[in-house]
């Protein structure tokens, strides 16, 4: 996709992107869906770009992709997996998060197994976990699962694997329909390591299995805000309506991250009660004064309404003048 932009020659835009002046984000959209000649020109100049600039460019591209599914920077991300700078490799993996190209799996697997940087290996583990999730959802061929899961389990079982990487592997394996999945989650949750326990809760959510409902419900009352937020996110993924009363309380938690997670989870679960709770929140003065929370409630209410087959979000929005006319 080429965004509506000035019609300057590609070489001029590229010179600005590769230069030393502050990056203009609008210029980066010109790197989407490059023609062959443009791509050749890009790579010719790329090797001379400073480490910091390459990192900034790829990170911004990854951020753009997260918010805009119409752009395609995948050739840049794919080649940047070989960049000398680990920060660039991590950004490239982030940019490929929603990729469905099966040819990338062996490349990402090598990063998990061989990259010298722990953050790169953790990001690679997350990417492989996302492939597992998409395959379990039927969005990718099921045939890729055995090898993927075998690779992730081998890394998880290795004594040389850092805890930060094992956490990400566990979270991804949570989605896998595999005989070891539940035991891995239980072992991590009972390990006494708070970080691993949080990843176990994440994995419970990723499994979307209601067997974990009691545990998740309990952790929504944790004294630690990080755990409450993680449990709220897991509750939304599992989708059990039994979570609704506790999530309604967490929507007014003292921690904003917990509030946002709870509000989003309510939207995922849906139902008449959820729509009523969220509609009431729109009229709450504290919510109205916080743009971030207000946006979250509106998005959650829209999601809940769509799940119920009611797509008119305007039903929950009231104009003061119209309300007066009805009196």
Image (spheres, rainbow, N blue to C red):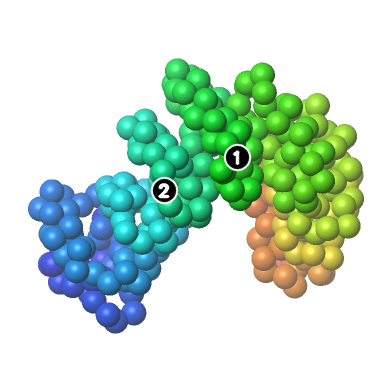
Residue at the front extreme of this rendering = 159
* Above/below status of 33 relative to 17: above
Mark 2 / mark 1, whichever is N-terminal: 2
Q: Is residue 224 left or right of residue 185?
A: right
User: Dot 1 lies on which element?
Assistant: loop
Q: Residue 51 in the image: state x and y as whole percent.
A: 32, 69
- Between 202 and 32, the one lying in front of the other is 202
Task: Find residue 136 and name its label.
Answer: none
Q: Residue 5 in the image: state x and y as whole percent.
A: 26, 66
Q: Quadrant of the C terminus?
A: bottom right
Q: Is residue 290 left or right of residue 59?
A: right
Q: Residue 33 in the image: state x and y as whole percent.
A: 24, 49
User: Which residue is depicted at the point 64% across and 44% down?
Assistant: 167
User: Which residue is depicted at the point 76% across and 57% down?
Assistant: 226
Residue under label 2, please give it.
Answer: 115
User: Which residue is depicted at the point 88% across and 57% down?
Assistant: 223
Q: Is residue 179 left or right of residue 95?
A: right
- Image quarter for residue 110? top left
- Give the foreground label among 2 and 1: 1
| Residues packed near mark 2 inside 10 Å, few (<14), some (14 to 19) or many (20 plus) | some
- Between 50 and 255, the one lying in front of the other is 50
Residue at the left extreme of this rendering = 37
Residue at the bottom extreme of this rendering = 21
Q: Residue 232 in the image: state x and y as whole percent.
A: 77, 47
Residue under label 1, please give it.
Answer: 159
* Above/below status of 190 relative to 317: above
Q: How far separated are the C-alphas under marks 2 and 1? A: 16 Å
User: Which residue is depicted at the point 52% across and 25% down?
Assistant: 150
* Above/below status of 48 relative to 318: below
């Amino acid at each position: 996709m080429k965004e509506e932009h000035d019609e300057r020659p590609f070489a001029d835009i590229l010179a600005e992107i590769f230069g030393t002046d502050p990056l203009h984000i609008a210029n980066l959209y010109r790197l989407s869906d490059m023609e062959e000649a443009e791509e050749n020109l890009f790579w010719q100049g790329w090797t001379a770009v400073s480490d910091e600039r390459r990192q900034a460019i790829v990170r911004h591209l990854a951020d753009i992709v997260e918010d805009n599914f119409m752009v395609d920077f995948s050739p840049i991300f794919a080649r940047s997996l070989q960049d000398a700078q680990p920060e660039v490799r991590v950004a490239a993996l982030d940019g490929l998060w929603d990729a469905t190209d099966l040819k990338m799996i062996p490349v990402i697997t090598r990063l998990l197994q061989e990259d010298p940087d722990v953050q790169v290996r953790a990001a690679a583990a997350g990417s492989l976990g996302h492939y597992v999730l998409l395959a379990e959802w039927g969005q990718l061929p099921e045939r890729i699962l055995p090898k993927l899961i075998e690779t992730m389990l081998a890394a998880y079982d290795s004594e040389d694997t850092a805890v930060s990487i094992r956490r990400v592997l566990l979270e991804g394996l949570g989605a896998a329909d595999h005989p070891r999945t539940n035991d891995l989650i239980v072992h991590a949750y009972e390990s006494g390591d708070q970080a691993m326990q949080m990843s176990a809760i994440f994995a419970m959510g990723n499994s979307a299995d209601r067997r974990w409902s009691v545990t998740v419900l309990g952790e929504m009352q944790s004294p630690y805000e990080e755990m409450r937020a993680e449990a709220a996110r897991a509750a939304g993924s599992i989708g059990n309506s039994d979570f609704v009363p506790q999530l309604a309380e967490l929507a007014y938690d003292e921690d904003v991250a917990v509030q946002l997670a709870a509000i989003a989870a309510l939207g995922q679960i849906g139902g008449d009660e959820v729509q009523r709770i969220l509609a009431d929140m729109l009229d709450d003065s504290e919510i109205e004064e916080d743009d971030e929370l207000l946006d979250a409630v509106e998005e959650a209410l829209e999601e809940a309404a769509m799940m119920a087959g009611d797509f008119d979000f305007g039903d929950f929005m009231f104009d003061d003048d119209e309300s007066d006319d009805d009196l």
